Image: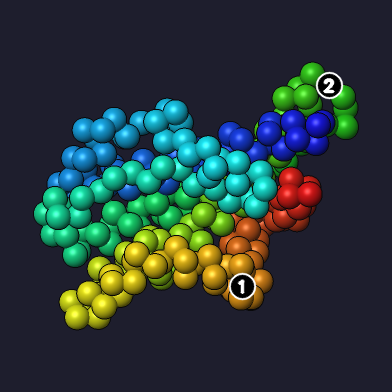
Amino acid sequence: MESFFLKLSVMLVPGMLAIVCHEVSHGYVAWRFGDPTAKMLGRLTLNPIKHIDIIGTLMIFFIGIGWAKPVPVVFENLRNPKRDMIWVAAAGPVTNIILATVSAFLLRGLVAFGNPAASGSPLAMLVEPVILMLAFSVYINLLLAIFNMIPVPPLDGGRVLVGLLPYRQAAALSRIEPYGMIIIIALVFFTNMFSYIISPVLRIGVQLLAGPQSGLVLGVTRLMMH
């Protein structure tokens, strides 16, 4: 039980912030490009209650990645649906990369400032959990960005690819969207894609952003996953 509350305290805030900001960014960019659907439905808010998916939130604690209720986007409302789809889809992963970068720099700064945990001071009781949350934030945001850029619709990478391809090839790729999640589940759970592609890219991203604190990021994540 104590282990569960440790996970809850470290993973919940950065995990929810990562998936909520991801979805809000889709809706915001869609609104800027002509589709007001998300705004009309009150989804352009950071209030997690508007976005929370119970199963997706629980998955953060069990598999280290989660999801929120997708923000609705009516691509036909966009001023240039094929082109604007690229920006709407890319907004989510780009937002996660920005959050990972900010978290990494804050983590570096706190550690460089001097982690007072060993002193047992009241400040240590505040700083230590913040460091753990920032470390997990780097990981979860990079993982969300990388995973969502898998080029299979309905993931963001698939929609970016649909927007980039010529019309004939884009139409052919779009037709697999109803089966996209089955394909993604098969790739993740029944192939070595995570071990050979996602995990190495994730490690490189962590090392680039967290630098000397990359070991801390990966160590905290391993601790949270056990």
Q: Residue at x 60, y 63 (%)?
A: 202
Question: On residue 190, which mark appears?
Answer: 1
Q: Residues within 10 Å of mark 1 (few under 14, many from 20)?
A: few
Q: Is residue 200 visible?
A: no
Q: Nearer the viewer, residue 172 or 21?
A: 172
**In the rendered image, which quarter is residue 151 located in?**
bottom left
Q: Residue furthest top?
A: 122
Residue lying at 54% horizontally and 42% vertically, measured from the top left: 55
Q: Is residue 62 visible?
A: yes
- Residue at 67% in and 57% down: 211
Q: What type is the residue that disc 1 sits on?
A: Phe
* Disc 2 crowd, CA 10 A, few/some/many (<14, 14-19, 20+): few
Label 1, secondary structure: give it: helix
Up/down of 148 relative to 26, above or below: below
What is the quadrant of residue 176 in the picture?
bottom left
Q: Earlier in the sequence, mark 2 or mark 1?
A: 2
- Measured as percent of width and height from the top left, residue 50 is found at 39, 31
Image label count = 2
Give 190 or 211, whichever is nearer the viewer. 190
- C-beta proximity under 8 Å, tags 2 and 1: no
- Reading the image, the residue beneath label 2 is 121
- Mark 2 vs mark 1, foreground winner is 1
At which x and y percent is residue 48? 46, 31
List x then y, in percent, for residue 160.
32, 66
Q: Secondary structure at mark 2?
A: loop
**Alpha-carbon span between mark 2 and mark 1:** 48 Å
At label 2, the amino acid type is Ser
Please state if 176 lies on the left or on the right of 63 as rendered: left
The residue lying at 20 percent from left, 55 percent from top is 75
x then y, percent, for residue 33: 18, 49
